[in-house]
Amino acid sequence: MRRLVEATAQAFADLAGGRAATTVRVRARTADAMASAMAAAVPAVGVTGGKVYATVDGRFTFHVVLFDLDGRLLCTMDGGPLTEARTPALSHVVIDRLARPGSSLAAVLGTGREALPHLTMLARALDVDQIRVWGRRPDAAEALAATGRSKGIPVRACRSSAEAVADADVVVTVTSANEPIVAADAIVDHALVCAAGATKPERCELDPALFARASAVITDSIEGAPSECGDLIHAVEAGTIRWDQVLDLADVLAGTVRVRAPGSPGAGPSSAGSPSAGRSSDRVGPVIFETQGVAIQDVVAAALVWQAHIDRWPANP
């Protein structure tokens, strides 16, 4: 996972520098079926490729395909485990860069397939005193907490989302909700919020009012967010943020936009000659990271798996 975190951070910095490329997600949809696809080119890890998947009754069937830089097909992979690794890896990157120093209290809101990977990621990324979990089904939250404790992680299930996020340094949301799951005033100014669930325009995990308090709002795809990121779509419609105030994660990781830790005086972004210039804020509030998931994450993760396979099973001469 550490290799994936490092490779993901570098890939996004390469995006900002024009040394890598990734597309927005496209969907083919009828009344009875839907398929989606996205692609990326990452010369630094020697591959191009993409992810294609079907969605049926809320279930996803993911596949990733890799090519070398000469166009030769290398492999296809089951994209499910890759998705479960690459999403928390990107959250880990953001936490490493933007969480308040000494962060030790975290919350996970949601109990689906991304909840446990994010729970274990938080235990690696932070020197945690406690991770609180909440879900719309209390029994699922209790089960998730028990699983975390069995791995040696200090986890406690909460009966309300407000209880889970109270004073939390890092808040992760991984639900499929279409309505806000936590009130804006429940999240403290020094929190870093990693929102990973609102990946369709109708979805909404965060109260639009939270964006009015935020010192910085960042996304992994400026291009894709207006059609993909439900939280941001709802907040823009509510008038609590404008699209031109949203920062690109690639610029942040490349250092062309500097964002201070949440809750710091002057925590808003500053920039020098970057496309994000003029978006600074004097708010002392949470930093919000909205991820929809982009192809470069899948392709980088798949490239690491492929290289590990080659290292273990070199081709015969």
Image (tube, rainbow, N blue to C red):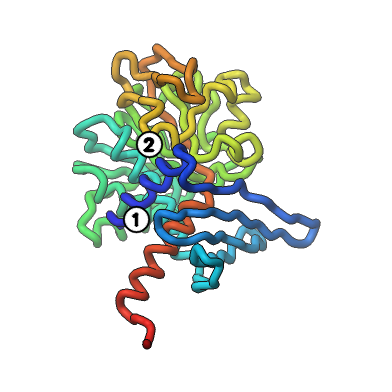
Task: Work out whether 112 lies above or below 192.
Answer: below
The single residue placed furthest to the right in the displayed view is 31
Circle 2 sits in a helix, a strand or a loop, which is it? helix
**Which mark sits nearer the N-terminus, 1 or 2?**
1
Name the residue: 19% across, 33% down: 102
| Residue 282 image offset from top left, x and y in percent | 39, 12
Kind of residue indicated by mark 2: Leu
Residue 145 x, y percent position in the rendering: 32, 53
212 vs 41, nearest the viewer: 41
Residue occupying the point 33% across, 31% down? 166
Task: Determine the residue positioned at 34% across, 29% down.
Answer: 191
Residue 4: give its label.
1
Q: Is residue 139 visible?
A: no
Q: Mark 1–mark 2 contact, CB under 8 Å?
A: no
In the rendering, which numbered label is found on residue 314?
A: none
Q: Is residue 194 above or below residue 283?
A: below
Q: Quadrant of residue 94?
A: top left
